[in-house]
Image (tube, grey):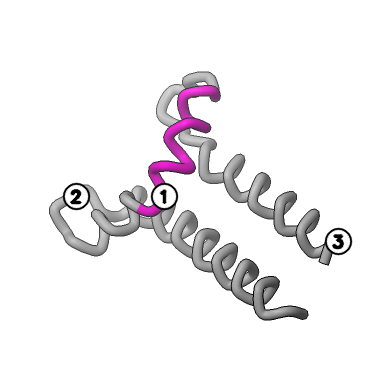
Amino acid sequence: MTYLAVFVEILFWILVITILTRSVLSWIVQDNSNPLVGIVYHITEPLLGPIRRVLPNLGGFDLSPVVALIVIYVIRTVIRALA
């Protein structure tokens, strides 16, 4: 693998871990004043926000992280196939 492919792979994993962290934090942390929570939300909101606007309201269930992870996996697979 080239250095660029390794770099992109690392970025994808960081994004996946951050999205999973946000999902877990949404279950247990209700205080958004924590700096770690702010950083995680700041990183993931540009990706999850547009997805959330497109998805229908499911009465409190946020499926945007699931959709984002599927999209990330598809993009990663396409990039790996092209490399």
| Label at residue 32 | 2
Separation of residues labelled 2 and 3 (CA atoms):
39 Å
Q: Is residue 25 left or right of residue 82?
A: left
Q: Residue at x 66, y 80 (%)?
A: 3
Labels 2 and 3: the sequence-earlier one:
2
Labels 3 and 1: the sequence-earlier one:
1
- Viewport quadrant of the N terminus: bottom right
- Viewport quadrant of the C terminus: bottom right
Q: Residue at x 24, y 54 (%)?
A: 38
Q: Residue at x 48, y 31 (%)?
A: 50
- Of badges 2 and 3, the one in the foreground is 3
Element on which disc 2 rests: loop
Q: Which residue is mark 1?
A: 44
Where's residue 40, x and y in %? 34, 57
Separation of residues labelled 2 and 1 (CA atoms):
14 Å
Element on which disc 1 rests: helix
Q: Is residue 67 left or right of residue 18?
A: right
Q: Which residues are magenta?
A: 43-54
Q: Which residue is mark 3?
A: 81
Q: Amino acid at mark 1?
A: Thr
